[in-house]
Amino acid sequence: MRAIETIGTLDAQGHIQLDIPQPQIASSRVRIIMLLDDEGDHLSSDQWESAVATNPVCGDLLHLYLKITSGRIAAASFKVQGCPPSIAAGSVLTE
């Protein structure tokens, strides 16, 4: 497994068009974390955004925090309540 950062655009149907195509060996599913503007509000410079993900099987909880500067991720941090693999996943996300 690997983590990447890229930027894309949502079209009118909600489909994502990535700015940089990703190499694909075979058909596969991916997990995507998106930062979306709320009702026309734009992500301002030096703004922190957050997201929460849970594992419904074991109850692990991941809080992800991203600092957005000029439309790019400038810093990332996380908090995890869960097992070592969940902690490792948070670490990979913020590398």
Image (cartoon, rainbow, N blue to C red):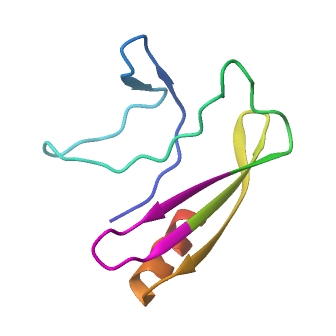
Residue lying at 54% horizontally and 59% vertically, measured from the top left? 52
Residue lying at 69% horizontally and 18% vertically, measured from the top left? 40
Q: How many marks?
A: 0
Residue lying at 47% horizontally and 61% vertically, measured from the top left? 53
**Quarter of the view holding residue 43:** top right
Place of residue 32 in the rendered image (x, y in percent of width and height, measured from the top left): 41, 46
Pick whichever, 48 or 23, lies toward us. 48
For the view shown, which residue lies furthest in the bottom direction? 84
Q: Is residue 68 above or below residue 42?
A: below
For the view shown, which residue lies furthest in the left direction? 26
Residue 33 on the magenta span: no
Residue lying at 27% horizontally and 74% vertically, measured from the top left? 57
For the view shown, which residue lies furthest in the right direction? 46
**Quadrant position of the C terminus in the picture:** bottom right
Q: Is residue 41 above or below residue 69?
A: above
Region rendered in magenta = 50-62
Q: Is residue 45 above or below residue 11?
A: below
Place of residue 29 in the rendered image (x, y in percent of width and height, measured from the top left): 23, 47
**Quadrant position of the N terminus in the picture:** bottom left
Place of residue 25 in the rendered image (x, y in percent of width and height, measured from the top left): 17, 46
Q: Is residue 70 left or right of residue 26?
A: right
Q: Is residue 32 left or right of residue 23?
A: right
Q: Is residue 19 left or right of residue 44?
A: left
